[in-house]
Structures are given as C-alpha cells and as structure tokens.
Amino acid sequence: MEIAERTQALALKIRKQKASIETEEATKNAFVMPFISTVLGYDVFNPAEVIPEFTADVGTKRGEKIDYAIAHEDKIQLLVEVKKVNDPLRIEHASQLYRYFAVTNARIAILTNGEVYEFYTDLDAPNRMDAKPFLVLDFSALDETLLPELAKLTKESFDLDSVISAAGELKYIGQLKRVLAGQFKQPEDEWVRFLTTRVYDGAFTQRVREQFAPLVSKAARQFLTEQVNDRLKNALGGPDAYVSVSSPAEAEQPPAEAREEVVEKAVNASGEIVTTEDELEGFRIVRAIVCGEVDVARVVARDTKTYCGVLLDDNNRKPVARLWLNRARKYLGVFDENKVETRVPIDHVSDIYRYADQLRMTVVRYDTRPTLVESEVEVGGEEMGLETV
C-alpha cells in the first residue's frame, strides 16, 4: 500500500479504539507499534531495527530509558517517546528526548500520544533538540501535504538529508497554518483590525471592532467552504461539476439549482410519506457499507418529503447520509466531523459505494464521540421512521 493508504488505515483504527485505551503501554501496543511497522515499515520484532526501552547513560543520569530507538543501516536514526493517548503533548514530556538526542547519532526525535506525532530535529543548534517540532502529524485530521515528508523516514525510502533540509520550511509552514486555523475559528483583535482596515476607511474604534468581528469570522467560514467546493468540483470532473457544501442549519434544503426539479413523494391514505424504490435501495447500500463498523440494526432510515435520511441509532444527531434521489439529478449527502453536509452528484444509486470509506468513518466518529457534546442536526420536514425495510 502507498503511505496515504497506510496512514488512513491507522487513522481509522485509532478512531475506533481510542476510547478503550487507558494506559501508556496500551497506547504503544495499539497505535505506536503499528505506526512504526505499517506506516514507517520497520520490523518491530527485529531488535536490530527497533529497540524498545532503549538505554543510553547521560552524564549522571544512569539507566534512563526511551521507549523506542529505530535504526537504519545499523545506525540509530529515530528516537520515540510515548505518552498515553488523549494526554496533551507538552514540551516537558520531551526531557528524555532532549538528553538522548545529544548523545546518540539520531537526528530525528518523535514525541507522541499515539494519535499526534511531533517530529523534532536540531535546526537551532547542532546536536541539541529544538524546542518546537518541525512537523506535526495528527491522525484525527490528517494533512496529506505532510505525507511525502513522512515517506522520507520510512525504511524503504529513508532520506535523512532531504528531511533535514526541508525541516526549516516545514517548521514555519506548520506553525503558520496552525495560527491561521486558530484565527479562522476565533479571530483575535489584531486579525480583525488587519482585515477591517483593508475594506473600511474609517477609524478602527471599539464599535467598528464589534461590528466587524462577526463579519470576519463569517467571511472566513465562507471562504473555506468555497475552497472546499472548488477542490471537490475538480475531483468530480472539473468546474462544471455541481457540489454543495452546507451548514447544518441549511442542510435540509436541496441544492439551489435543483430545487425546481424536486418531485414531491406520494403520501398514502394515512398521510405517511411513501419511500421510493431508489431510496430503499440506497438505504440498503449504506447499511451494507457500514455494517462492518456497527450493528446493522442500529442503522435506520427516516424519510422526508424531499430526501431520505440514514441515521445511526435513529438519532437525528447522528446523520450517516442523506439520499436526494427524487429529482432528475441525484445526490448523496455525506457528513464531515462537524456534521456539515456535502452533496455530491451520483448517476445511479450504486455510485454510493464510491463513498464507502467516508460513510464508514462517519459512523466510527459517532461511536467514539460523547453524545452530550454532539451538536444536533435538525432533519426538518415530516418524518417517518423505517426501522425495518
């Protein structure tokens, strides 16, 4: 498998098992050893390649151990220190890495809790580990732009010189991206001032700040949505492809350009909505896709006048998919980690299988996320539970 597939497989494993991991040792066995073996490609059972509990006496420190040392061509190249999953990584956790970095040949140190991996080197001073990582790999939100650099640390493609030469740029790009992400989520006054003064000619007073702060936040969200739309359009066939990324509040509406094509479904004598054959088939396909992750009995359909929703546990806070099949152009609605729906066009109901990985990841997220913190997604319209189809 390519490194993208290997990291995605480990990401899915982490999402499914993270809630049941309670110790550092369990974190090593469940997540870190698979990372070393399946992602980086080293044999964790070969002590010439992966040395657990690696010991190197440092000054007056005797018998201190580091969790793993990884060798390539008989030289120690990577040091790995592990903390329990869900524990936040702090620089204080890296004290042993600091000491070992100076007395071994290793140029790369990794601090991890099994889900987040922080990679350090010695950009600021030779043989002295930097205080900030040059690369942060988070398996809860994989950044695929980092995978080519990660590949350079694998056994099959090991290229330390290339990693070190790119580390300086990676370090600052990563930090800048994290700063930008923070500003997009909750803009600081300086960010609001910077953008406001580019579009507003008056003085930047407190009243102006209060007026523009929500506008900056809204503009940032819309900009990101438009960028996602553009990328999806390119992936689905160029600029003419239709993709709709909507917020939960507006997700019950069909795509704007297709609203006139909506076909109202039949209502029987009791006033209940009649589910179409396409919707029944689509529901069966979604249920078949996710049955490997959850009990099939937990996946139910709930029909409305404009779409058929597929829910986990018959809970409208756990939408798995929406089937927009009652119009000339069919769409499948899939959900991200924030329960924002993206509608993608499909030619036939069987095209739902193309989105199997995303549907599986959706149900896995619901099983690993506390229900109390989930934000409710209103399904809208008249609904009818279809627990047995």
Image: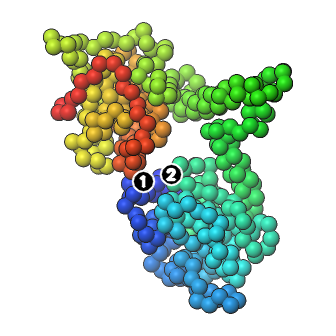
Which one is in front, 169 or 177?
A: 177
Image mark count: 2
Label 2 sits on a secondary structure element that is loop
**Quadrant in which the C terminus appears:** top left
Name the spot of residue 220 as percent of width and height, x first.
65, 31
Label 2: few (<14), some (14–19) or many (≥20) C-alpha neighbours in 10 Å: some
Q: Which residue is mark 1?
A: 15
Q: Amino acid at mark 1?
A: Arg
Name the spot of residue 109 as percent of width and height, x first.
64, 70
Is 385 rendered above or below residue 286? above
Name the spot of residue 133 as percent of width and height, x first.
68, 61
Q: Which residue is mark 2?
A: 140
Residue at horizontal 61%, vertical 31%? 221
Outermost residue on the left side: it is 269
Q: Amino acid at mark 2?
A: Ser
Is 301 rendered above or below residue 107? above
